[in-house]
Amino acid sequence: MTAGASEGQAPPAPVGDDVLRVEHISKRFGAVTALVDVNLRLAKGEVLALLGDNGAGKSTLIKIICGFQQPDSGRIVVDGEEVTLKSVDYARSLGIDAVYQDLALIDQLSVYHNMFLNRERVRGPLLNNRAMRKLARERLDSIGIGLKSVDLPVARLSGGQRQSIAVARAVYSDAKILLLDEPLAAMGAKEAAQILDLVRDLKRQGDVSIIMIAHNYGQALEICDRVNLLQHGEITLDKLTKDTSVQELNDIVMEEYRRALQERHRSA
């Protein structure tokens, strides 16, 4: 276990406060071990940062929580009940949804059509465009996403606006647990600020609990309540953001790099 892990555990939350618990999850892909005995908890209304280098197991863990992949061992508890997340659709029925970097938006369609993708409102045999347009406007406004028009094709939106549309769609599909896979990746400062503001608004409303994969420690500490550091398939640090710092996180990661270099030199 990485240095700092033993003293880095946040105080355990009462079970009744958790909307999600991941207990002793492991996952292998052939000879590769992606996750090793992972334990993670998410409290109601909390924003949890999931940090770690590429290959640490973050995306695998998110895919297990959203039902896309099955763990080899361990259990998942949602709202106090153990569940088997057998598919993405089943996870969504329990209020778990994910927003990935590719967003699953259709560039040629309007904002409001993307908001209701695969959940279109109809009137008889026809699409009820008026109702979808009105609801899309109301829903985007309610969580602070300011767009001049919901009739614009999403291809004409900025990266931050596109990410906002994908998040809003998940929120209004009754998501109670929202998984954001690097929502700030490849964004400029202005676009990143827009997404951070959106997460703040969702946090203030308190209806959605969020796990956010991030690489930028400063942004994660700014917006999140608690941070988990995932290294080599293990959670090696679990702290309230007010009790840690960018320096501490960097020190832990650099210690891991130094250890890896030493092992490489010994085996050379």
Image: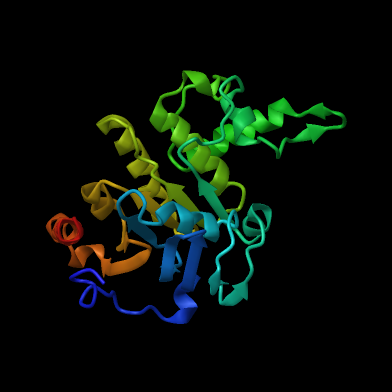
Residue 224 position in % (x across, y down): 31, 56
- Residue 128 vs 56, above or below: the answer is above
Residue 20 position in % (x across, y down): 50, 69
Visible residue check, residue 113:
yes
* Left or right of 37 on screen, residue 214: left
* Left or right of 164 on screen, residue 77: right
What residue is rendered at 68% in x and 58% in y? Answer: 90
* Left or right of 9 on screen, residue 137: right
Q: In this orientation, which residue lies closer to the viewer: 47 or 84?
A: 84
Q: In this orientation, which residue lies closer to the viewer: 106 or 43?
A: 106
* Quarter that holds the C terminus: bottom left
Q: In this orientation, which residue lies closer to the viewer: 204 or 247?
A: 247
Q: Find residue 78 and report its image quarter.
A: bottom right
Q: Find residue 262 and report its image quarter.
A: bottom left
What residue is rendered at 23% in x and 51% in y? Answer: 217
What residue is rendered at 47% in x and 22% in y? Answer: 148
What residue is rendered at 35% in x and 67% in y? Answer: 234
